[in-house]
Image: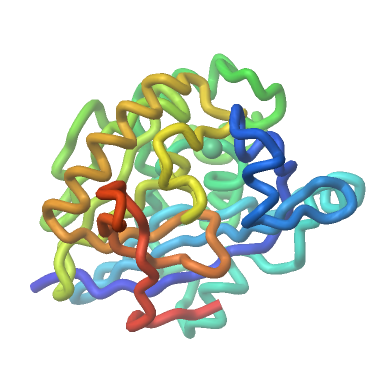
Amino acid sequence: MNWNWTLLDAGRFKLDGGSMFGVVPKGLWSRFCKPDEHNCLPYCCNCVLLEKDEKRILIESGYGVGWSDKEKQMFGMDESTILTALVGAGIEPDSIDTLILSHLHFDHAAGATLLPNAQVVVQKQEWEDALANRSTMSKTYLPRVLESIKDRVELVEGKTLYTDGITLTPRIGHTWGIQSIEVETDGGTLCFASDLIPDHHHVGLAFSMGYDMLPWENKMTKQSFLEEAYADSWTLVLCHDITHPVVRVIKNEKNAFALEPVTDFSRNQ
Ligand SMILES: [Zn+2]
């Protein structure tokens, strides 16, 4: 039996457009993403609920709670979290016993404090980098979050068949320890590639983010990832995309990779 999946939106927020597009000039990215008066762009925190038999696993947890009014305003955070998303989908949050995180940046991992029953699965490399605060961003690995999960973290190393039908794959670039999650579903492989391709505007190989620790490696990883996803017809969930959360990889008229929206999926937000 395969995994059933549901898309959950664990909160809206805004990030600086320049940071999101790294070396891509604003003259180019602002043609298809219109920034607000503060040069920010709107994003969401897409998560995926997996269900099979009595088992429930969550991929990602969004930015969670515990933010000051100033921070909420700065990031344009709304009041929704992974808790409101789960309740909206009719899921008892305490029934989640496993939370798989792609990496430990706050907008992916901070919601883990809201799911105290969940074992948190992450790459060992990512855990060690988070504890050492090894990042060009000073406040993305949050000590309060790491403290909350330290006694329930389950570390994996390298490519791992985590459980039947769920594979974790390192995708080095955005961080040293970031991983994608591949899930066997009735519709084929569903992949959560996280900040390797945060939204559909980042399909181009040069479209790295200013937040990427290793832009060159990210570019190489993205190329091999897109080849694999295209060859095997994967369905991708994009972690921060509001308008195109679920896509498939196609080739355009110039024979370059592009992303085509998928609309026939279940969604709760
Ligand atoms: Zn990140």
Residue 54 position by quadrant:
bottom left
The answer to whether 143 is drawn above or below residue 102 in the figure is: above
Q: Position of residue 192 (x, y in %)?
A: 35, 53
The answer to whether 259 is drawn above or below residue 136 in the figure is: below
**Residue 152 visible in the picture:** no
Residue drawn at (62%, 73%) of the image: 84
Residue 253 position by quadrant:
bottom left
State the quadrant of the C terminus: bottom right
Residue drawn at (14%, 75%) of the image: 186
Q: Position of residue 162 (x, y in %)?
A: 19, 45
State the quadrant of the N terminus: bottom left
Residue 121 position by quadrant:
top left
Q: Can you tell me which quadrant of the image ligand 1 is in?
A: top right
The answer to whether 212 appears left or right of 185 in the picture is: right
The answer to whether 114 appears left or right of 164 in the picture is: right
Q: Position of residue 178 (x, y in %)?
A: 39, 33
